[in-house]
Amino acid sequence: MYQQIAMYATVFFVFLLALAFAFVYGESKRSGEYSTIQEKGYKIRKFYFLGLIAIMAFATVMTLGRLPYDSNQAEAEGLNEGIVVKVTGIQYAWEMSEETFKAGDKVQFDVTASDVTHGFGLYNENMELVAQTQAMPGYTNTVYYTFKEPGTYQILCLEYCSAGHHVMVKEIVVEPEGGASDE
């Protein structure tokens, strides 16, 4: 959803920029006193700048509160009361304290790395990114995710970590709520 909003906003501002160029091109053919043109230009630039500031402030306020990485939000939603999984990224694998879950499980992934920086990306069966964070040596990042659908999820490295980066894939299984026999 946010990507579409960003795309539409970009197209809108490119359109406005094209209009500004068209206006300048059209006005360049006319001759007139420079001071009146300059005064008009300053007014337009001032309102355009203030409009951009207002739109960016609005977008910031609307989107910052929806980021999934806030520990207070996780606490309020009860996500940190679930399963804690220790994840370590090593060239070229993921080591996890637990690899099988049930649909509905609230999981707290504590992610770190033992060698270089890796990107922890959790993908569902449709290869849609559902959670991500950085895996850095000497530091633990926490990301919360509730598995809603059973299936095979993949963890891919999102940060180029050298020649074997492309084989850094871990599959985890999410069984239906009652277990594997409830299909």
Image (cartoon, helix red, strand yellow):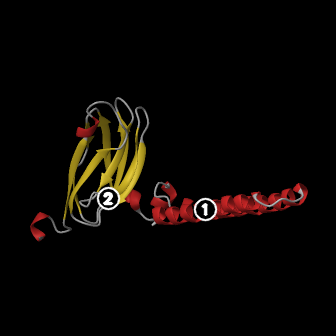
The answer to which image quadrant residue 125 occupies is: bottom left
Disc 2 packing (10 Å; few <14; some 14–19; many ≥20): few
First along the sequence among labels 2 and 1: 1
Give the image location of residue 113, x and y in percent.
36, 35
Q: Quadrant of the N terminus?
A: bottom left
Q: Which mark is residue 180?
A: none
What residue is shown with label 2?
128
Amino acid type of the residue tagged 2 in the rendering: Glu
Q: Which residue is mark 1?
A: 13
Quarter of the rendering containing residue 31: bottom right
Residue 139 place in picture, x, y as percent: 44, 36
Q: Residue at x 25, y 51 (%)?
A: 154
Residue drawn 29% across the image and 55% down it: 123
Badge nearest the viewer, 2 or 1: 1
- The secondary structure type at the circle numbered 1 is helix
Q: Is 148 above or below relative to 137?
A: below
Q: At 88% from the left edge and 55% from the top edge, which residue is drawn?
A: 34
Between marks 2 and 1, how big is the CA–CA gap?
29 Å
Q: Classify mark 2: helix, strand or loop.
A: loop
Q: Going by the image, does 29 lie left or right of 163? A: right
Vertical position of residue 94 compared to residue 66: above or below: above
Is 16 in front, or is 23? 23
Q: Is residue 84 above or below residue 47?
A: above
Residue 94 shows up from this direction: no
Residue in front for this viewpoint, 34 or 155: 34
At which x and y percent is residue 132? 38, 50
Compared across the picture, whether 100 is left or right of 28 comes to left
| Most foreground residue, 137 or 45 | 45
Q: Amino acid at mark 1?
A: Phe
Task: Look at the image and tell me in which quarter the C terminus lies.
Answer: bottom left
